[in-house]
Image: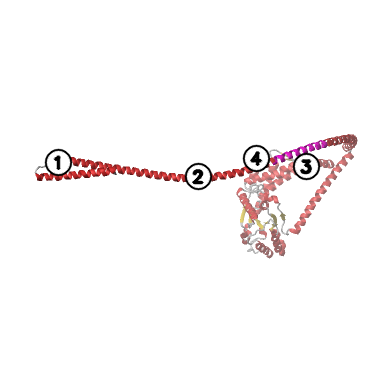
Amino acid sequence: AVILASTSSKANSLRSRIQAIKDRVGNTGADGGAYKSMKQLAWEALALEAEASSKETALISLKLKHSVRMKILEIKYAAKDKLLEEQTESLGHVDATQDAVSSKREFQVADAESDLDCVIERIGSINAAASMRNATKRDLELVSKSADAERSRERAQIMAEAKSEREQEQASLERINVAGEAKQKQAVEMIGVVYGYLRDGLNHVVYTNQGKRQCVLMAIAAALFVFAISSARESISLVFAAIQRLLTTPNLVREYGRQRWYHCKISHEEMFQDVILPAPLKDRVVSLTRSARASRRHDAPYRHILLHGSPGTGKSMVAAEIAKCTGMDYALMSGGDVGPLGTDAVTQIHNIFRWAKSSRKGVLLFIDEAEAFLGNRVNSGMSEHTHNALNALLYNTGGERRDFMLVLATNRPEDLDVAVLDRCDEFIRFPLPDAGCRRELISQHYRALVKEEVAKNNAKATSIVTRARSLLTNEGTFHIQIDEDVMDRKQLESIVAATDSFSGREIGKLIITMQAALYASDDGVINKDLVQAIVDAKVAEHNTKRILMTK
């Protein structure tokens, strides 16, 4: 500030001197050259102005330097103030941290003191436990020593008892051996005696006629005893079945069968395995059977079925198989049995349906020859009693039923009443068997009725009973022999072709005729020519029957 003040005063003095020079120059012009020349005054003025400008420049530079120094000082003082504040704040933090650390150290010291107390207590408990363990160990050692002593005493006692028992057993074994030798000797003597009796009896039976007759009589008596027992058992079963039929089954039911629990276990693949039908018909029957089985399981209404077709095509067999596969009870009645009942027909029809409701498993009611009493009511030839019986059946079959399934079979579906047809949910036509079905039917019946019968007869002919009977009656045994070329592929195909338009029943009768020919032959030999002759005869009978039916 002093430097600036001196510099400013010097500048002002220079300005005043310059002004004085200017005034003097003016005065010089007026006075006529009393002072220095104008040129010198001019140079002096310029020098003074230059010095004044340099002084001003120096003054400005000094002002700038002063302002810069002031800014630097302000910045330094601001930095010092900030640093001082930060140091003050950090000192506050340090004090707080020192207070926290000191308090934490005090807590740790307190915890350490408490932990030290706990450790001291634990050491005391450990010492007490160690002393108790030592005491227990000493007690256990004492107990072990006493137990060893007791065991040694017991071992010695047991060894002494075992030795005495072994000696007793040895003595007992010696006595048993002596007794066994005596018994063995006695048994050998008895066996010798029995063998002697058997030898004498066998010699008597083999070498004397009286012995042979006695042996045969004993065999006959034993056979009669066995036959009497089996006959009594079968008779009791038949009587019981008859009593049950009389007491529980309605009069119109000709055949009745209760299904067992294992019938419901038949799988879908096992259904109708033994039934030979055309493939489309068999698939439809299996589908209906599965539907009926599901209806029974879920308590759904049953579907009534009408089976129609030529006689002997398997309608009754299919109805029985449906009942077996579904697990339902099976009842068979014939339509021809209703007419002779007269006024009692209506009561018996109601009894059948009332009886069907009492079955827990449901009843499959199969009516064969349904056209006999379910014919068209428009027909004037129907009697009043038959008409009433038809109305009774229509009354009991109206609506959905969950207690029975109605299956009708007829050869003439066109003769049935319209209301009866309306009761049926499914119509299944049974055609005559085609070539494939006839081939399977012939093979199946031939295997069951001829080959198995021959094996059974030959086994029976070689049995002891048959030989004994032949000895008594002086009749020889009857063996049956079938030639190897009988029913080979060629003959089977010729029979299949010849039995065109045969029903399944007629094919069964053809094989039954072959079975009868087995026992009718003198030498018991069945050859290919005999079989062909039987087939030709049955084909001729079939053609004659067709002619008579046509007429």
Residue 372 visible in this rendered orientation of the protein = yes
Pick the quarter of the image with the N terminus. top left
Q: Nearer the viewer, mark 1 or mark 3?
A: 1
Query: Mark number for residue 42?
Result: 1
How far from the left and from the top, in percent, is residue 142?
77, 38
How far from the left and from the top, in percent, is residue 372?
67, 59
Q: Which of marks 1 and 4 is in front?
A: 1
Q: Relative to 281, is 128 above or below? A: above
User: Measuring 37% from the left and 43% from the top, which residue is drawn there?
Assistant: 76
- Which residue type carries mark 2? Thr
- Which residue type carries mark 1? Ala
Q: How crowded is mark 1: few (under 14 residues within 10 Å), some or many (20 or more)?
A: some
Q: Give the alpha-carbon distance from disc 1 to disc 2, as whole Å.
A: 80 Å
In the image as oriented, which residue stretches furthest toward the front? 34
Q: In which quarter of the image is residue 150?
A: top right
Q: Give the alpha-carbon distance from disc 3 to disc 2, as whole Å.
A: 119 Å
Q: Which of marks 3 and 2 is in front?
A: 2
Span colored in magenta: 128-154
Q: What element carries label 1?
A: helix
What residue is pinned by disc 2? 97
Query: Mark number for residue 460?
Result: 3
Indicate the colouring scheme.
secondary structure
Q: Give the alpha-carbon distance from disc 4 to disc 2, as whole Å.
A: 115 Å
The answer to whether the residues at label 4 and label 2 have Cβ atoms under 8 Å apart is no
Query: Which mark sits nearer the N-terminus, 1 or 2?
Result: 1
What residue is pinned by disc 4? 489
- Which residue type carries mark 4? Arg
